[in-house]
Amino acid sequence: MSKYKVILLDFDGTTACTIPAIYHAASKMLENRGYKVEKQVVYDNFGLALPFAFRCFAGDDTIDDATIEQMTIEYNNIYKEEGEQLIELFDGVVRTLDSLTKAGIKIVIASNNIRPVLDRLTANLGIAKYIDDIVSVEDVENVKPAPDIALEALRRYNISGEEALVVGDSTFDMDMGREAGCHLCGVTYGSHSPEMLRNTGARYIIEHFSELEKIVLE
């Protein structure tokens, strides 16, 4: 029997390879507004909620909230129309999620993305049937790296952090889970290095999504 009742699973960069879509949509939107976007900056800060991400990608922290709202609309349109066709699941995701759900483990998407996008992508990628719940930016006051998303998931399932495993590719995921008292698993194929993940508290480091099965069902 698993010691973990719930897996808090990051989506972007952990479950699905979305960074080409994010880079395409963000760079096109920002370049249309006169900003020069460095690919490495996007990769290094992949996982931030959009208002923080846009200011970071643009290198301009003076962008006001009203402009950010307009940017978000433009970005979401480009993302949906041009970016989503670039998105693929990482290898082993379907088989592993199937195995975990058959073992009675609850799978909760814990993401800085918005609910409509997560609903659409999990359906389009064929994994919605494995997802028990989604906690997204609409559900909390503070997004990752704050612990709110993880804490909300723990509240919904009435469990302690010791009974939950956060799985993510970034230090933002690790910070969130650590501050919520969860166990942490970092994946090496996303945005941040194994060293960065370990330094922010990752108990496990995996190179392939399928390795999660051994950790959870050991």
Image (spheres, rainbow, N blue to C red):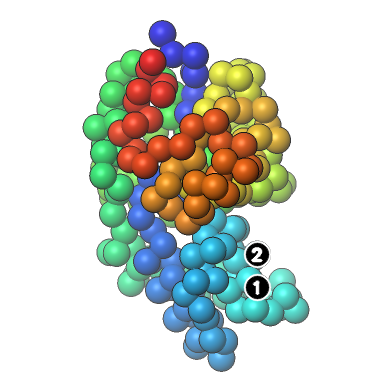
State the image quarter where residue 154 is shown: top right
Instruction: Name the residue type under label 1.
Output: Arg
At x 48% / y 56%, what residue is drawn? Answer: 191
Tell me where residue 37 appears, x and y as whole percent: 52, 81
Residue 55 marker: 1
Query: Furthest residue to the top?
Result: 1
Tell me where residue 218 appears, x and y as whole percent: 38, 15
Disc 2, SS: helix
- Residue 193, relative to residue 81: is it above or below? above
- Residue 37, relative to residue 197: is it above or below? below
What residue would you read off at disc 2?
A: 52
Disc 1, SS: helix
At x 62% / y 37%, what residue is drawn? Answer: 201
Q: CA distance from mark 2 to mark 1?
A: 5 Å
Question: Could you tell whether 206 is left or right of 173 in the image?
Answer: left
Asked whether the beta carbons under mark 2 and mark 1 sit within 8 Å of each other, the answer is yes
At x 26% / y 39%, what residue is drawn? Answer: 92
Query: Furthest residue to the bottom?
Result: 34
Tell me where residue 44 appears, x and y as whole percent: 54, 63
Tell me where residue 160 appears, x and y as whole percent: 64, 19
